[in-house]
Amino acid sequence: MSENNRIVISQVMMPSQANPNGNVHGGEIMKMMDSTAYAAARKYARSNVVTARVDELEFHQPILIGDLVTCTADIVFVGHSSMEIAVNVEVEDLDHEGKPQKALSAYFTMVALDRNSRPKAVPPLILDTDEAREAFEAGRQRYEHHKQLKKREREAQKARDLAKKTLREPVDAEAAHGAKVVELQKK
């Protein structure tokens, strides 16, 4: 992936970000991830952006007070106005020697906006390595998958709306089914 489409942000975790056991709240890290994705998308689009979706958020290990957290955001796919950003979080225990460990990962979909807060076109992504092409194709597949999910959800919502409407309207059984309604009497 191109260094031009990468943003890296690091921060040492503080007690105000943790629970009583010393584990940093997942929401704190998610906020940091969103900020890193925002910076990458904003730099790439050269306009304001908003978070549209977060996919495949996975927690790999806990993060503790005093740990150095590094978020790396790489733009892996672009559509017309949307960008998918892979955000990876590494954690490093500053009290001990050792390599940083993977802590979280997710894909953030950001949408570029114009001055009127309408979706704005973004430039095509330059795919200069095999790794970038593979990441782009995986992003395209996730994009198409989400389009299909949204289409199915719209169709399901239409069916639910129609069912609600149908249940609210009185039904003339004779007209609807061409049958004669017969009243049963108790003996």
Image (cartoon, rainbow, N blue to C red):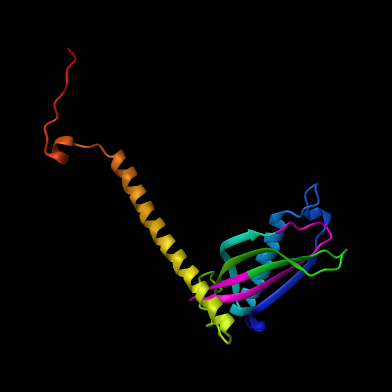
Q: Quadrant of the C terminus?
A: top left
* Residue nearest the viewer, comparing 83 with 90: 90
* Position of residue 48 measured from the top left corner of the image (x, y, whole percent): 60, 72
Report the side of 138 relative to 5 (left or right).
Answer: left
* Position of residue 42 measured from the top left corner of the image (x, y, whole percent): 63, 75
* Residue nearest the viewer, comparing 93 with 13: 93
Residue placed at 35% from the left, 48% from the top?
A: 161
Residue furthest right as drawn: 95
Q: Quadrant of the N terminus?
A: bottom right
Residue 86 falls in which quadrant of the image?
bottom right
Residue placed at 86% from the left, 68% from the top?
A: 97
The region drawn magenta spans: 61-86
Residue furthest front as drawn: 98
* Position of residue 57 measured from the top left corner of the image (x, y, whole percent): 61, 60
Majority secondary structure of magenta residues: strand
* Position of residue 114 measured from the top left corner of the image (x, y, whole percent): 54, 74
Residue 32 falls in which quadrant of the image?
bottom right
Residue 12 falls in which quadrant of the image?
bottom right
Residue placed at 53% from the left, 77% from the top?
A: 136
* Residue nearest the viewer, comparing 173 with 86: 86
Q: Is residue 84 magenta?
A: yes
Q: Is residue 79 magenta?
A: yes
Report the side of 136 relative to 14 (left or right).
Answer: left
